[in-house]
Each structure stands twice: as structure tokens, then as C-alpha cells.
Amino acid sequence: MLTKRLLTHFSICLLSGCLLAGCASQKKLHWQDDTLQQKLAAVLDTAVTQYHLLQASVPADRFARTFEKGQVQTIKSDGWVSGFYPGTLLFLYRHANESSLLAEAKRKLQVLEKEQFNTHTHDLGFMMYCSFGNALQVEPNPAYKEVLLNSARSLLSRFNPAVGCIRSWDSDSSHFLVIIDNMMNLELLLYAFRQTGDSSFYKVAVTHANTTIKNHFRPDYSSYHVVDYNAKTGAVQRKHTHQGAADESAWARGQAWGLYGFTVMYRETGDKNYLGQARHIAQFLLNHPNLPADKIPYWDFNAPGIPNALRDASAGAIMSSALQELALYVPAAEAKTYRAAAETMLKSLAGAPYKTVGAEAGGFLLKHSVGHLPGKSEIDVPLSYADYYFVESALRYRGEIGIPGQKPAAK
Ligand code: GLY
């Protein structure tokens, strides 16, 4: 029964992959705003110049992370954000078709490749799918596919059947820590399932998502950042925060990861439970009294000092991209709300005070993100993943890349 279901699913996925490939040249959709489309085209053109500038500050064996103390800050390939820099270069290559962007992305892929065997992180989805996954959209190189399959195998090694989750952070054996961010790594597993038909990838992704629904969410569909499980029994020991304002607060980027992650889970499985979860999260976010008029969230929905608290542009960028996809799966009136919110977010990010001008942030595109405020790190700065999801969202809006799950436009 399961095998039949998986095989059917496998064929649907292959089909949706073909549909997706057919979407790349899609033009403006009826609901999109001409002025914003043009504005984003100009922003993307400028982004190419800015990323050339950024490239000059990134050493050969490192990856762009942020801009602090007047300098571009970088990380090694094993840092969780390593894949976003090559991923953004690949998006910009698809926009501008400039070979130097592709050449820089490929140099970085070579440095990143070894992480396919890294079993000490759950971030392989971010690191490898946002880079090699995007590279496959540019050229169907079998070597990229192999890297992704090995990365998915490495990620599987962190799954604990007693807990029903992939371990996020390594810690002593009395704590099995899972963070909401981990929902973003499941797309890599579902890619591996589509490619190989091996149901273990599918089962782990679905089990992790189901356990997350059960334990990470509050009745209002906001999510905890960290759930601490007993590794032997799977019992929940504690729910708390690491990067948020308080254990019971709604850390903005965590909510964004949940929204994006459950939207992807619905696309890849067709399971309505995941769609319901994504819709509930969207409603929590968009109806929240602390969501500002420009729809770029404070770094935490319960941050002390609102309305004077810092914003997190990265959360706005992630949400704007996810909402465009979620709008494909819901009734028209609801889709309109999600698209309008995504548009407002994109409009806000494309101008002051968020969008950088020229070299003011070393070439990064967006200002005003918050990495880890309680840890006193990356506060009110550019971040490579804010750029990545902003560019993804802008390209989705402009129809320059298909939104996965989107049907091709009628001829
Ligand atoms: N995944 C870590 C973060 O969102 O900051």
C-alpha cells in the first residue's frame, strides 16, 4: 500500500518537476503590479553590480556572511549559511545571464562540496540544497545530483526513530535538541526521494514534520524555537528559545521557517495537514497586532520595546517568498491576502530603509536583519540569507523563476 502510494507520489513529483522546468520563462501574472515588477527588475540589475563588489571581499575558501564593523564578514564551508552566497549568485546569474556570476558560484560549489559528508549538522538542506539545488536548475550536472544525494544521506544519519526527528544541534546525550528551523532541511530529503524512489527519505521527512506539528506549536500556531527531547523515550523535556526574546515568545525568523517549511511539505506530499499548518501559521503572522504596516516583522513578535524594537528583514524576505507559493494552494480570496502581503513585504524591502545603496554594506543587498540578539551577534546587519530569500522572492514575483508547484501559464 505504502509502496503504491510512494510510487504514485514519485510520478506526481516527476511530473511537477517537468512542469516546474517549463515555468522558467513565465511572464507577469494577472494579479501582479507593474510598478513593483519594474522596481524589482531595477533592484536585481543593481544587485548584480553589488554582488560583483561583494565578491572582491570574499576569500577563495570562504563564504559571505554579513557586514559588520565596516567590513564584509565571512565563514568557512561548514557554517550553516555557506550555501546562500553561491545560491544568490546562481539566482542572479539566472536574472542577468552574466558568466562571471556563474564562475564565482562554481568556485564556491567546489569549496562547499566536501560538506556532503558532514554528519555534524542538520543544516545540510540550507547549505547544499540552496546551492547545489539551484546549480541543478542552471545545468543538469549529474555530479551536483550526487552531492545532493550524499548530503541527504548524511542528514538521515541524524534521525532518531524514538523521537521522530532529525537532531538539530549536537549536545550531551541527555538532550536531543530540535529547532523549528529544521523544517527547512526537509526539502533536500524529498528531493532525494524523488530522485531515488527510496522511501526512507520520504518517511523521515514526513515523520519529522509530523512530530514538529505535535510538539513545536502553541494553540495559536506560533512556534517554540527549541524542543528538547529525551533521546531514548522521545518524551518532551522542555520547550524554550535560543534566538528569541523569551521561551514563550514568537521569534520572527522561526515563524518564517515554519511557514516556508510546511508550504514545501504540502507541495511535496500533497498532505492537507501540512497545508492546514502553513495556512494557520500565515494567519497567525498576518493577523498579529505587532506586525508593522510595512509587514517587515520585528525580530520577535513579542520583542521588548515594540514599536521601537529592531526589525528582521530576513524574516520578511522568507515570508514574502513562502506566501507567494502558499497562495497557489488556497482559495482565491485567501490567495489574494497572501499575495498582497507578499507584495507589501517586497515593496518595503526594495526601498529605504532596508535596501542598501551601492557599496554601503560591502555589496550586500538588505540592511536591518537580526541574527542572534540574545547571543549579541549579528544585530541589525545585512545577512546572506536575507539577500538569498529576497532575491528568490523577487525572481518569483517577476516570474523569472517558476514557483515550485505552479502550473505553467496558459499559452
Ligand atoms: N537557522 C538559524 C537562524 O535562522 O538563525
Image (cartoon, rainbow, N blue to C red):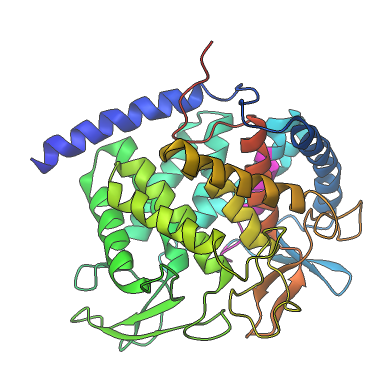
The quarter of the picture where the N terminus appears is top left
Indicate whether 66 appears above or below 378. above
Left or right of residue 103, residue 141 in this image = left
Asked whether the viewer can see residue 379, the reply is: yes
Return the residue nearer the eye: 219 or 242. Answer: 219
Which residue is at a point 66% across and 81% down the rendered structure image? 373
Q: Residue at x 78, y 48 (%)?
A: 350
* Residue 41 spot, x, y in % from top left: 78, 34
Q: Position of residue 369 (x, y in %)?
A: 71, 67
Q: Quadrant of the C terminus?
A: top right
> Residue 296, image x and y in percent?
68, 61
Range of magenta residues: 78-91
Say left or right for 242 vs 356. left
**Residue farthest along the top direction in this orientation:** 411
On whether residue 90 falls in the magenta region, the answer is yes
Question: Depth check: 90 or 102 in front?
Answer: 90
For the point 81% across and 41% down, which residue is it?
43
